């Protein structure tokens, strides 16, 4: 990631790029990579939001933890908690051989992609 990690805008830009890559992966039927980029988009968008609320940057990939932090800092995205757990599991499963990743249908991945975009639209300011 280029840019200042303490600048929310840097996180929002990269989150938006990850969402764009997720859409490309989905269109090419690379479902596991779609989910990896959805996870990264959500993680980075949440970190950007939290940093904009003077949260001290934490090196974590756990979306559930970031969702709870976001709630404590003024935005309720708890509706995404179960999907966040799914994305986190898929992210770790694709990166570490001892965790294992799950298989998802095209429809399940489409839902996760759509809901990821909805979350980003909720927390990223409209003007980047």
Image (spheres, rainbow, N blue to C red):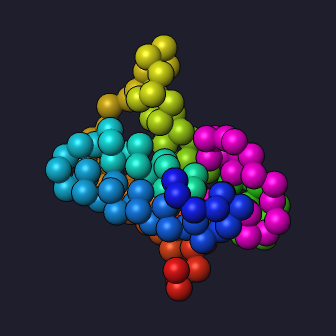
> On the picture, is 81 further left or further right than 26?
right
> Residue 107 placed where, x, y %?
28, 50
Residue drawn at 82 percent across, 65 percent down: 54
Identify the image quadrant of residue 12: bottom right
At x 69%, y 42%, the residue is: 59
The quadrant holding residue 69 is: bottom right
Q: Nearer the viewer, residue 82 or 93?
A: 93
Which residues, given as a range, are shown in magenta?
45-66
Residue 48 is one of the magenta-drawn residues: yes
Kindly tell me whether residue 49 is visible in this rendering: no
**Residue found at the far left of this picture:** 28
Q: Position of residue 37 (x, y in %)?
A: 41, 49
Question: Is 28 displayed left or right of 25 in the figure?
Answer: left
Measured from the top left, where is residue 7 in percent x and y? Answer: 67, 67
| Numbered marks: total | 0
Residue 31 position within the rendered picture, expressed as x and y whole percent measured from the top left: 28, 43
Residue at the far bottom: name it.
127
**In the figure, 17 relative to 127: above or below?**
above
Residue occupying image coordinates x 53% and y 39%? 88
Residue drawn at point x = 43 percent, y = 52 percent? 38
User: In the rendered image of this protein, does residue 104 appear above or below residue 44?
Assistant: above
Residue 102 seen anywhere in this rendered image of the structure: yes
């Amino acid at each position: 990631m280029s840019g200042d990690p303490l600048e929310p805008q840097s996180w929002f830009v990269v989150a938006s790029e990850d969402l764009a890559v997720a859409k490309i992966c989905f269109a090419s039927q690379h479902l596991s990579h779609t989910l990896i980029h959805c996870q990264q988009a959500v993680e980075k968008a949440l970190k950007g939001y939290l940093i904009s609320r003077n949260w001290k940057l934490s090196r974590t990939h756990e979306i559930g933890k970031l969702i709870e932090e976001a709630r404590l800092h003024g935005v309720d995205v708890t509706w995404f908690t179960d999907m966040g757990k799914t994305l986190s599991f898929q992210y770790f499963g694709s990166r570490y051989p001892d965790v294992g990743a799950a298989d998802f249908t095209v429809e399940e991945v489409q839902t996760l992609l759509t809901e990821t975009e909805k979350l980003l639209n909720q927390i990223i300011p409209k003007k980047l």
